[in-house]
Image: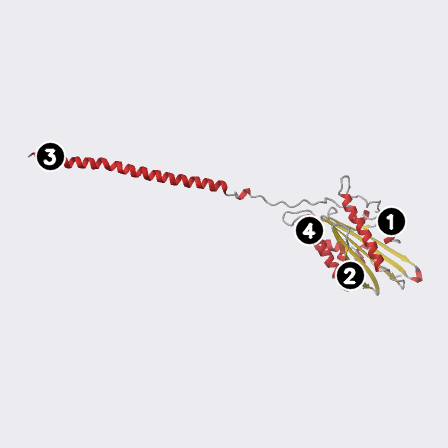
Amino acid sequence: MHRPAQRQRQRLTRVLVGAAAAPVILFASACSGDDSGSGSDGAKKDTGAESSASAPSGSGKETPTVEKAAFAKLPEPCETLTKKTLGDLVPAAKDKSGRTGTSDDVSTRGNCTWESLDDNGVDGSQFRWLRVALNRFESDQSLGSGAKRAQANFTKQVADAQAVKGAKNVKTTPVPGTGDQATLVSYDLKKDKETFKQQTLVARVENAVVAIDYNGAGLAGDKQPDGGDLAKDTQKAAKEAVGAVVAANEPGGGASSKAPGGGAKDDAKDDAKGGKDGAEGDGGKGAALDGGEGGAKDGAKPKSA
């Protein structure tokens, strides 16, 4: 009678002990899982935070800045040469103050022309035509620095001068000591049965390009001018024009600063007008010869004696 009851109590005790142990195991398991989970989550969060802190923000990236252009203005083109130089190059010019060409933005481009016709009657005439063209380039984030853009324009104008249609005896000469770089292109060009000696000197100084176009001819039987002499005169004019650009940008220098020693009297837009800029510098096309922009338009076409 007592043994069944005793066995029953023993079974009940085992059930209760088992029942009591289960929550402990489950709790331990749960704690273990929570600790592991919490640790893992925490590590993930920490790692995420560190990654977030170390990863560069898209909006925080610095955009490279383009170098500021050295020159902010240009001198008046008609005031870049001294009276003496004009007297040597265009001695018979009726107006030594020159003729200002059209420009849609005088702060970045401009040109001036002079024409000289020394009529010797039955002995013929000596003709000279001179132009100073200035171009200045601003620095642009998408297009590059002003100096880089000026370099491209310089290269283009020299190439244009070397590729003039009908040019004979083309000669290209580097010209040291004039701006940062300078090149003289010389050639002969026949127009209206007359042969003209053309000199085109393109110079770059910082973010500005100076182009000197100078040509001469002996008309109606007069002797032809010496190409070497014309080249020397062109180089002299280029040095003065480059000097005028530099002087205009010095402290106290104005946009209308005259050439040293006294003087006589055209972003994306600039690059888009690269051809026009070259035409204004003429790229050696001898505006007086081909009736291009600044040529016949400026009344510079030679007259027969």
What amino acid is labelled 1 in the image?
A: Lys
Residue extending furthest toward the left: 1
User: Residue 103 location in percent, x, y?
Assistant: 75, 50
209, above or below 124, in the image: above
Q: Earlier in the sequence, mark 2 or mark 3?
A: 3
Q: CA distance from mark 2 to mark 3?
A: 128 Å
Report whether residue 266 is seen.
no
Could you say where residue 29 lies in the image, as x and y percent from the top left? 29, 39
Q: Label 3: which residue?
A: 6
Other residues around mark 3 within 10 Å, as few (<14) / some (14–19) / many (≥20): few
In terms of secondary structure, where does tag 3 sit? helix
Residue 84 numbered mark, or none: 1
Front disc: 3 or 1: 3
Q: Quadrant of the C terminus?
A: bottom right
For badge 2, the amino acid type reads Lys
Horizontal relation, residue 269 to residue 198: left or right: left
* Residue linked to disc 2: 171
Decide: marks 3, 1 in contact (CB < 8 A)?
A: no
Relative vertical location of residue 77 with respect to residue 126 in this rendering, above or below: above
Mark 4 secondary-structure assignment: helix
- Which is more N-terminal, label 2 or label 4? 4
Q: Label 3 vs label 1: CA separation?
A: 138 Å
Asked if the residue under mark 2 is in contact with the one under mark 4, i.e. CB atoms within 8 Å, the reply is: no
Residue located at (69% from left, 48% from top): 146
Q: Residues within 10 Å of mark 2 (few under 14, many from 20)?
A: few
Front residue of 45/286: it is 45
| Nearer to us: label 1 or label 2 | 2
Q: Position of residue 108 (x, y in %)?
A: 73, 48
- Label 3 amino acid? Gln
